[in-house]
Amino acid sequence: MKKRILISDIAKALGISVTTVSFILNDKAKEKRISEALTKRVLDYVKKVGYKPNELAKSLRTGKTKILGLIIEDISNPFFGNIARLIESKVYEQGYRIIYCSTNNDVDKARELIQMFYDRQVDGFIITPSDGLEDTVKQLQQSNIPVVLFDRYFPNLETDYVGADNFQGAFDATNHLCQQGYKRIGFVSLYSDQTQMKERSDGYLKAMDNNKQQSFIQKVQMDASDDEAMESLKDFICENRLDAVLFSTNYLAISGLKASKKYNFAMPAMIAFDDHTVFKLLEPSITVVSQPIKEIAENLINILLLRLQGKIKATRKLVLPCELKIRESTKAKATL
Amino acid sequence: MKKRILISDIAKALGISVTTVSFILNDKAKEKRISEALTKRVLDYVKKVGYKPNELAKSLRTGKTKILGLIIEDISNPFFGNIARLIESKVYEQGYRIIYCSTNNDVDKARELIQMFYDRQVDGFIITPSDGLEDTVKQLQQSNIPVVLFDRYFPNLETDYVGADNFQGAFDATNHLCQQGYKRIGFVSLYSDQTQMKERSDGYLKAMDNNKQQSFIQKVQMDASDDEAMESLKDFICENRLDAVLFSTNYLAISGLKASKKYNFAMPAMIAFDDHTVFKLLEPSITVVSQPIKEIAENLINILLLRLQGKIKATRKLVLPCELKIRESTKAKATL
DNA sequence: AAATTGCGCTAAAAGGTTTTATTTACTAAT
DNA sequence: ATTAGTAAATAAAACCTTTTAGCGCAATTT
């Protein structure tokens, strides 16, 4: 690791040209009809001295960096953290690297990050777009740089996308609550136009309609503090005398649980969207709608890699099924 | 964002040389005695056309990438996830970017990642070193590239380091358990030579000695599956009839909690090292030794930046105090 | 009058690759 | 004996910056 050795050093040492070495190193020996003897000689020498090409110079010349930009909402949320980890290792096997950043749902920050990654010439993007990022994504597409969205998308923009079946997930969860005999089932969501929220909301409403039940919906500001969220959740649950709640995200569910502790009211039956370590451990354990994290990560990478290789033209939208993991928090309501 | 504009385009458009533009863009206008009029003219034009230099070319020339490598144990552990997020935003303000990767405590992977980052010419490293990484870190130092370790360090290697006062944290926690009247206090750790584990273990032992109590120690294999960990924890707690346990990491504590649920035994009084969302929510809530995450992140960055600017020579080792957050899991034991 | 200094700017090298276009030295065919 | 063709390798351009060294001129100093 002491002093970097260059391709020209190798050429000099072996008494051949830089070009030849480069061809051999880039697996173009056959194509360029370099003799097998020389190929072997070069390869052996390169291995012996441990030469590693300067990736910067390589990227400058080729225009490819082999780095992908991952723009997610919040790396400290286990849902995103786990996806990030899976993506990271998947991509790693393919010789690509990840640069990631969290936007915390701030459009301006998202725009800045994307610009920064663009300046660094990442080869492609995986983005959980925040509200208002449509233009930026469009610009990327126009610059001909592959983008795959996940978790949510823009209805008016043709993009690759991988996500869970939010409608079905919320629908199943709500149905499950109905079947268990709950009568006053609330839904907690965010003030946001993001598609995944809309879909979950639609799933809840559809199931409520099917079961001929009155619906209760509470939205929380995206930038609300934990305390604000807790207070409004307390009011929502208590004032409406809800006997069950579907939370549209795991952190909303956690705010709800904290609220029940802080304000000392009994949490009714509940289901959270997205699993979390907490939920299995609590007493009672919490029923969740679980997204297929692994499949999401795999498909994101696959689609992005295919794009990078120019192997697909039409945009791909992939919607993967959620799984309802039934735990103790939704046991059947004692019938009167 | 359509077609990249180059510095030469600007020079041509304004009828001046590339050099001049470069000087102005790099704040060397005064130093190089470029006239104010011209400086302004260039700056205005650059802003107008939205020119952004090609960072690759810049890095190739200067040898600086303004990218820092962050090598952590596991991005999906909230302790590391939170540190990563804090580091990310801190560093961002200073014009640096982060590339991160998780090692999952695998030395070989760690070595490979570091090599990869080195090849990409990151300007500096922040590393949670896994066992056996000493040589690699030493090589980096010899290559004159700044490295700051955190969470753990190598006693025989002079390096910058930021971490928590693990000894004191474990000592205080153990003392607290003693004061609450517990008599059979166990300590759960890992088979690992990492310093933070040793220090926590020492803190526990010292406190037990001071209180003239028998100590119980159980170690878990680092690569143990969740089930294996759970089983050995069950045995440890039940067979020794422990009335209190200090867990040396948050995920060990979580395994313990899962075990108590799975094997249906009552979890005795407990304290976990490192906080976790779960712990506040559980019934009873869990007392923790909490590391000063924010201070750790800030100091890591500060030290690394000072190094990068060549402003410090002597190595800095910073040990920050932990805080014992007392919750319900360690209420006083009913005296007989 | 000659030498030095200061000013405002620039040509060209350097950084380390990949890739295009070409050369050289053969062999085979006319 | 010349031409054509091909295998094996290479020189040089290109990628886009930063930075070194220096130019031409006017003003000042010796």
Image (cartoon, coloured by chain):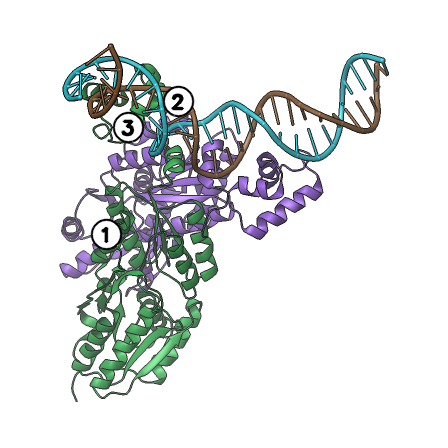
Chain colours: A green, B purple, C cyan, D brown
Q: Earlier in the sequence, mark 3 or mark 2?
A: 2
Q: Quadrant of residue B197?
A: top left
Q: Which mark is residue A302?
A: 1
Report how far apart the C-alphas of labels 1 and 2 lie in the structure. 38 Å
Report how far apart the C-alphas of labels 1 and 3 lie in the structure. 29 Å
Where is residue A38 shown, x and y percent of the image? 23, 19
The answer to whether marks 1 and 2 mark residues whose Cβ atoms lie closer than 8 Å is no
Where is residue A300 shown, x and y percent of the image? 26, 55
- Label 2 sits on a secondary structure element that is loop
Q: Label 2: which residue? A: A3
Where is residue A321 shown, x and y percent of the image? 19, 66
- Label 1 sits on a secondary structure element that is helix
Say few, some or many: other residues with alpha carbon within 10 Å of mark 2 (under 14 / 14 to 19 / 20 or more): few
- Does residue B243 appear to the left or right of A263 in the view shown? left
Callout 1 and callout 3 share a chain? yes
Identified by mark 1, the residue type is: Asn
Q: Which mark is residue A23?
A: 3
